[in-house]
Image (spheres, grey):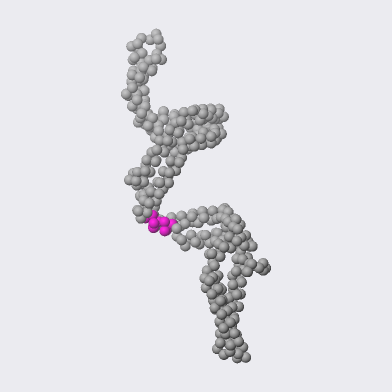
Amino acid sequence: MRSLAVGLLVLAAVVYLLTLDAGGFWGYVNAGAEASMVGAIADWFAVTALFKHPLGLPIPHTALVPKRKDEFGKSLESFVQENFLQEGVIRDRLAVASVSARAGEWLSDPANAARVVAEASSLLTVGLEKLRDSDVEALVAEVLIPRLKEEPIAPIAGNLLAEILTDDAHHGLVDLALEEGYHWLVHNQETFTAVLGERAPWWAPDRLNELVTERVHLEAVRWVADIRADPQHRARQAFDSLLRQLADDLLSRPETQERAERLKVRLLEHPQLLASGMAVFDAFKKALRDALADDQGPLRERARDELVAFGGRLRTDAALRARLDGTAADAAVFVVRRYGGELTAVITHTVERWDGREAARRIELQVGRDLQFIRINGTIVGGLVGVLIHAITGVM
């Protein structure tokens, strides 16, 4: 394009020289060629002055890009921040984009849901493989356990126990313990009587001890059976009262709180705690990795079904779409408010690192074609204006 613009200038100069001092029609051609040269040279100067000194001459207000690239970068940063990273602009664009509706339409296709699950499974698998047991163990030992030691356990345990008792959430555990205790007593009579027999007086006859322990065993079985069958049994109520008292003591009694803290520290300092925890974590990691690797396994199949169902809900539930779009807009606005300055500052910092001449060359390569059109248009328009002026002069 630059060669074309120069060629038009040369053509205008040749025509001007060939028609010099000519009259009539050729006078109009001469005037047009003269004006074309003026327009071409003027626009050449203007275009060249943006990127370098014309003819190497240090004319004021030339080579603007190399000299003022830092200012241009700051101006571009301000322009982007003021016109693109504003809350109103972001919310309007997200509203027009209808992100949740388009996501619902896309996820409703089982093939797309399967693709999401496959990609997520691959990423999670890579993450699990990169997660080293030594790093997790160090995190637990150096960060979590010391933090747990500093955190008072009594108020937490007291409040948790009080909530459990309020909701009667412990009854299932009590029923399970009674059921297991009943079956153990029924099937382990010899063990039960042997333990009791160890506490019998040495002077008592063996037969008497056997009768007593058998009777105690029978009464224990009956007692546990009665408690198991009666949800309102006095023993259950007494146990609930004991737990309530424990919850109150954990919240208000210093002696109980101190014992709870000592118990917590002993548990946290026990060497087997970390080893057992890491063994559980390693088993969980292996099981999760195997489940993610099974394309037809229940985990990935359930994930695909849930994604398709969620996509269907997004398509039909306008209220859900509105909530998700609002949440997305709030998140985008938060990110822009918090990090918008850092994001746009990348423009300024990048431009500042450019060499002036290199920056001019890059920009000229991007927009130079259009700038050469300015020179071409200047040549043509200048020639037309020259012909018009010559005509008006002839009439006058």
Which span of residues is magenta-colored?
100-108
Please report the residue visible at 64 percent of the width from the left and 62 percent of the height from the top. Answer: 67
- Residue 43 lies, with reference to residue 249, above or below; the image says below
Please report the residue visible at 60 percent of the width from the left and 61 percent of the height from the top. Answer: 357
In the rendered image, which quarter contains the C terminus? Answer: bottom right
Q: Does the magenta segment cover residue 106?
A: yes
From the viewer's perspective, tell me whether residue 32 is left or right of residue 283: right
Q: Position of residue 122 (x, y in %)?
A: 40, 46
Residue 377 visible to an observer of this rendering: no
Q: Does the magenta segment cover residue 331?
A: no
Q: Where is residue 234 in the image (x, y as percent from the top left)?
A: 41, 29
Going by the picture, which residue comes out furthest to the front?
Answer: 18
- Residue 294 lies, with reference to residue 155, above or below; the image says below
From the viewer's perspective, tell me whether residue 28 is left or right of residue 299: right
Q: How many marks?
A: 0
Please report the residue visible at 35 percent of the width from the left and 43 percent of the height from the top. Answer: 294
Residue 59 visible to an observer of this rendering: yes
Q: Position of residue 115 (x, y in %)?
A: 38, 51
State the image quarter where residue 211 is shown: top left
Please report the residue visible at 46 percent of the width from the left and 28 percent of the height from the top. Answer: 272
Q: Where is residue 60 in the image (x, y as percent from the top left)?
A: 67, 68
Q: Magenta-highlighted stretch: main secondary structure?
A: helix
State the image quarter where residue 186 is shown: top left
- Residue 300 lies, with reference to residue 378, above or below; the image says above
